[in-house]
Image (cartoon, rainbow, N blue to C red):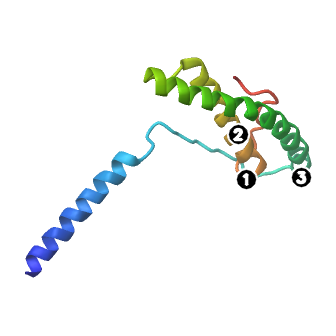
Amino acid sequence: MIDTDKKLRSEVRGAYQEIVRRDCMETVKINITNVEKASRLELFIRWIWGFIVGIILCIIGIFAYIAVMIQWLHILLLGKRHPALAKFVNNWYKAMAQLGFYYMLATDERPPLMPEL
């Protein structure tokens, strides 16, 4: 009885690990680099830069949300993604992530004022 119970637990654990491996996002890669030395002036510039870029990305985000809705309909009707819409939304998400990492002091690399869309 104990051997059967251990075998069952092992099978369940193996199945769970397989599901976790399959569900991981293998296409998203994040590489963050920072330098130990930090500028005090950069802290203040960070707030202003983050605010300006944040407003621009919020405005673009409205269009990205509309693009996601159109993409959803496109996938529903045709069964495939539209390349231009997918690129636009992916680049917007990338720009939001870059701003978040910069604003939260994870990196000193300043995001561009206008993202690549």
The amino acid sitting under disc 3 is Arg
The quarter of the displayed image where residue 111 is located: top right
Q: Report how many numbered discs are placed on residues in the image.
A: 3
The amino acid sitting under disc 2 is Met
Q: Nearer the viewer, residue 85 or 43?
A: 85
Q: CA distance from mark 3 to mark 2?
A: 24 Å
Q: What number is the disc on residue 40?
A: 3
Q: Nearer the viewer, residue 15 or 98?
A: 15
Q: Is residue 49 left or right of residue 16?
A: right
Q: Which residue is mark 2?
A: 96
Who's the residue at 87% across and 46% down the image?
A: 42
SS for tag 2? helix
Does 72 appear above or below 38? Answer: above
The amino acid sitting under disc 1 is Glu
Q: Is residue 86 left or right of residue 113?
A: left
Q: Which residue is mark 1?
A: 36
